[in-house]
Image (cartoon, rainbow, N blue to C red):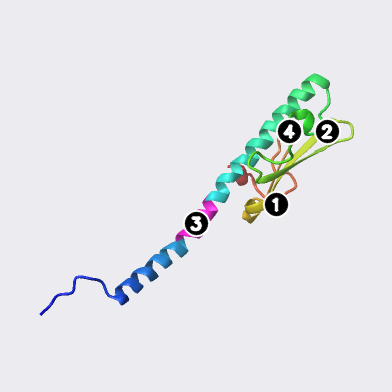
């Protein structure tokens, strides 16, 4: 009798089905971890802008109403995953910074936007919690 040393088509199909099942489970978890890791960029950028606002306030006694005067050339985070905006009161005594997820990051339905105001309150008025801030 002759022994076969190869694998059969059925064995190969079973191995591919197992591999597909493992990939189907692992990929969504991977995507979620990647999206959560990008949240740090939004919080870091807003905290840096808040620091620049406080320096501006110390010098001029009111908050800046434009991102450009704070050294921001484009109203997006460095990677472009979040759109930045700023709302300053007419008297210049308060502000609110907002970062909203755009592009692929918009798939992060848990934390699509971040906000920070002049009192240091995070996500005030939003349905998201501080857990988004890592």
User: Which residue bears the numbered disc 2?
Assistant: 65
Is there a contact, CB below 8 Å, between mark 2 and mark 3?
no
Label 4 or label 3, whichever lies nearer to me, is: 4
Whole-Å distance between the Cαs marked 1 and 4? 27 Å
Sequence-first tag of 1 and 4: 4
Q: Position of residue 106 (x, y in %)?
A: 66, 53
How packed mark 1 is, by other alpha carbons closer than 10 Å (few <14, some 14-19, many 20 or more), is: few
Instruction: Indicate which disc residue 127 carries.
Output: 1
Say if the magenta span includes residue 121: no
Picture mark count: 4
Label 1 or label 4, whichever lies nearer to me, is: 4
Whole-Å distance between the Cαs marked 4 and 3? 34 Å
Whole-Å distance between the Cαs marked 2 and 3? 40 Å
Whole-Å distance between the Cαs marked 4 and 2? 12 Å
User: Which residue bears the numbered disc 3?
Assistant: 29
Say if the magenta span includes residue 32: yes
Instruction: Indicate which disc residue 72 carries.
Output: 4
How packed mark 3 is, by other alpha carbons closer than 10 Å (few <14, some 14-19, many 20 or more), is: few
Whole-Å distance between the Cαs marked 1 and 3? 24 Å
Whether 121 is drawn above or below 127: the answer is above
Magenta region: which residues? 26-33
The local secondary structure at tag 4 comes to: loop
């Amino acid at each position: 009798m002759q022994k076969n040393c190869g694998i059969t088509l059925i064995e190969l199909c079973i191995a591919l089905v197992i591999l597909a099942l493992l990939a189907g489970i692992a990929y969504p978890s991977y995507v979620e971890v990647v999206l959560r890791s990008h949240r740090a960029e939004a919080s870091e950028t807003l905290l840096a802008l808040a620091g620049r606002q406080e320096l501006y306030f110390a010098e001029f006694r009111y908050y800046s109403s434009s991102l450009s005067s704070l050294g921001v050339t484009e109203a997006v985070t460095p990677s472009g995953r979040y759109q930045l905006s700023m709302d300053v009161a007419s008297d210049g005594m308060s502000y609110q910074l907002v970062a909203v997820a755009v592009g692929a990051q918009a798939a992060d339905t848990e934390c699509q936007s971040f906000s920070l105001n002049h009192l240091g309150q995070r996500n005030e008025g939003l349905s998201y919690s501080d857990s988004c801030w890592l």
